[in-house]
Image (cartoon, grey):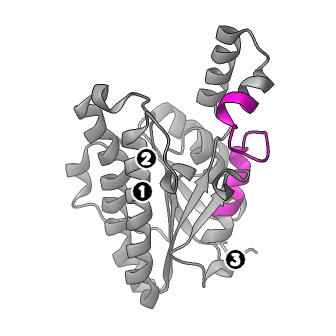
Amino acid sequence: MTATTGRSALVTGGGSGIGAACARALAAAGVAVTVADIDGAAAAAVAREIGGRPWEVDLLDVADLEELRLEVDILVNNAGVQTVSPLEQFPPARFRNMLALMVEAPFLLIRAALPHMYGQGFGRVVNISSVHGLRASEFKSAYVTAKHALEGLSKVTALEGGVHGVTSNCVNPGYVRTPLVDKQIAEQAAAHGIPEQQVLERVLLTESAIKRLIEPEEVAALVVWLASAHAGMVTGASYVMDGGWSAR
């Protein structure tokens, strides 16, 4: 038995990358996991693997989430996307959609989950933020804005939830090894005629003291700890996993 055995969780963006790693790690800790993803086949595949339940959902359909009620003990807000563009060229509709996905949807899911969590006197909200929730980079206006807003939402949830036994925290990774990042590395290495390790060191990890990507399983391990009874006094915090980037 672990401190999380018998609990239930919802992981958004659980069909791949960090979300899938979180779903696997929570399931291994005895949690019954619902894997939510816009890609229904991916959600179903991960759910089958871990003995969980899939939920095909488009979190941009925010109106559909307004009356939602969730009976889960652990909520992992992970779903997110990235767009790189100068401010003056950034498509306004894309900006709005990214904020809806990464701020409004987490708000609505937290809102849906809190009554159950309050009723049982236990709840864990874990928001997958980013080093960009604490720092800014050029050409990522929507992502940086959304992650900064998620940090604020997480802290308010912590303040309101504390008396009810509910904690809320952010996990703030730097660059994580996902298929999307691996593809970017390979493309930049080919374009510049340099080895992939040099792309990491010169481009992606310039500010990092540790010159490697974060593994999704490393993020998931922290999520599982934050979801456990052992982290009952940890709330309103932002746990940075960025290889030293934000130490500068």
Residue carrying label 3: 3
The local secondary structure at tag 3 comes to loop
Q: Tell me the crowding category of disc 3: few under 14, some 14 to 19, or many 20 or more residues within 10 angstroms, Cα based.
A: some
What number is the disc on residue 144? 2
Q: Earlier in the sequence, mark 1 or mark 3?
A: 3
Q: Is residue 201 above or below residue 10?
A: above
Looking at the image, which residue is at 58% across and 38% down? 16
Q: Let me know if residue 22 appears in the view.
A: yes
Q: Earlier in the sequence, mark 2 or mark 3?
A: 3
Instruction: Please provide percent x and percent y for residue 247.
Output: 68, 58
Q: Is residue 110 above or below residue 116?
A: above
175 in the magenta segment: no
Q: Quadrant of residue 89?
A: top left
Q: Quadrant of residue 229?
A: bottom right
Amino acid type of the residue tagged 3 in the rendering:
Ala
Q: Name the residue furthest front.
A: 248
Query: What is the distance, in whole Å, between disc 2 and disc 3 at their CAs?
Result: 34 Å
Instruction: Please provide percent x and percent y for residue 42.
Output: 53, 34
Looking at the image, which residue is at 50% across and 41% down? 137
Residue carrying label 1: 148
Q: Quadrant of residue 163?
A: bottom left
- Between residue 135 and residue 106, name the one nearer to us: 135
Instruction: Please provide percent x and percent y for residue 90.
Output: 31, 29
Q: Is residue 146 left or right of residue 234?
A: left
Q: Which residues are magenta?
A: 200-223
